[in-house]
Image (cartoon, helix red, strand yellow):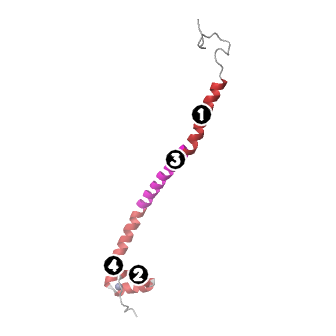
Amino acid sequence: MNEKKCNGYESMYTFLSEDDFLKHLENCEECKAEHERMQKVSSLIQEAKPYIIEKRNRAKVLKAACAIFIIFFSTLSIPLYTVGTHMYEDVMASSMTAEEMGLPVDEYGFLYIN
Ligand SMILES: [Zn+2]
C-alpha cells in the first residue's frame, strides 16, 4: 500500500494528502532528506519573519510619512498660501496711511517728524 512510486518530493507533497505524504516520507529516503531540508528552510523563514515584518512596517511608516507629507503640502499649503495672501491684502487695505490718520507727512506721504 505504501509502495507508491515516487514522482519527486514536490509532486508527492502536492498530490498526496498530508497523512499519505508523511507515510511516503517514511518509505522514501530521497523525499525524507528533501523534507528535512525544507523544514530547515521553513524554520529559517520563521526566524527571519520578525525581521521581514519589521522591515515591511518600516517601509509602511515611510510610505505613510511620504503620503502625509504630500497631502500636507498639496492640500494644506495651498489654502495657507491663499489665506496668507488675503491676510496681506486685508492688512494693506485696512491699514490707514499716516496722512489718513492726520499725522504730518512729507511730500512723499511718509510720516514727517520734526
Ligand atoms: Zn519520495
Question: Foreground: 37 or 96?
Answer: 96
Q: Residue at position x 33%, y 75% from top?
A: 37
The front one of 102 and 38 is: 102
Residue occupying the point 36% across, 81% down:
9
Q: CA distance from mark 1 to mark 4?
A: 69 Å
Front of the two marks 1 and 4: 1
In the shown orientation, is residue 2 left or right of residue 70?
left
Q: Does label 1 or label 4 sit earlier along the sequence? A: 4
Indicate whether residue 76 is drawn in magenta.
no
Q: Position of residue 102 (x, y in %)?
A: 68, 12
- Position of residue 83 in the picture relative to residue 43 (left or right): right
Q: Please determine whether, in this image, residue 96 is positioned above or below residue 12.
A: above
Q: CA distance from mark 1 to mark 2?
A: 68 Å
Residue nearest the viewer, comparing 51 with 68: 68
Crowd rating for badge 1 (residues with CA inside 10 Å; few <14, some 14–19, many 20+): few
Q: Which residue is mark 3?
A: 70
The residue wearing badge 4 is: 34
**Which residue in the structure is indicated by mark 1?**
84
The disc labelled 3 sits on which kind of residue? Ile
Q: Earlier in the sequence, mark 1 or mark 2?
A: 2
Spatial CA span between label 3 and label 2:
48 Å
Which amino acid is tagged 2? Answer: Tyr
Tell me the amino acid under the disc marked 4: Glu
- Classify mark 4: residues with Cα within 10 Å, few (<14), some (14-19) or many (20+): some
Amino acid type at mark 1: Gly
Q: Which residue is mark 2?
A: 13
Q: Which residues are magenta?
A: 50-73
Q: Farthest bottom residue?
A: 1
Considering the numbered disc 4 on the image, is that residue within a helix, a strand or a loop? helix
- The span from disc 3 to disc 1 (Cα, nearest Å) is 20 Å
- Give me the C-alpha separation between circle 2 and circle 4: 11 Å
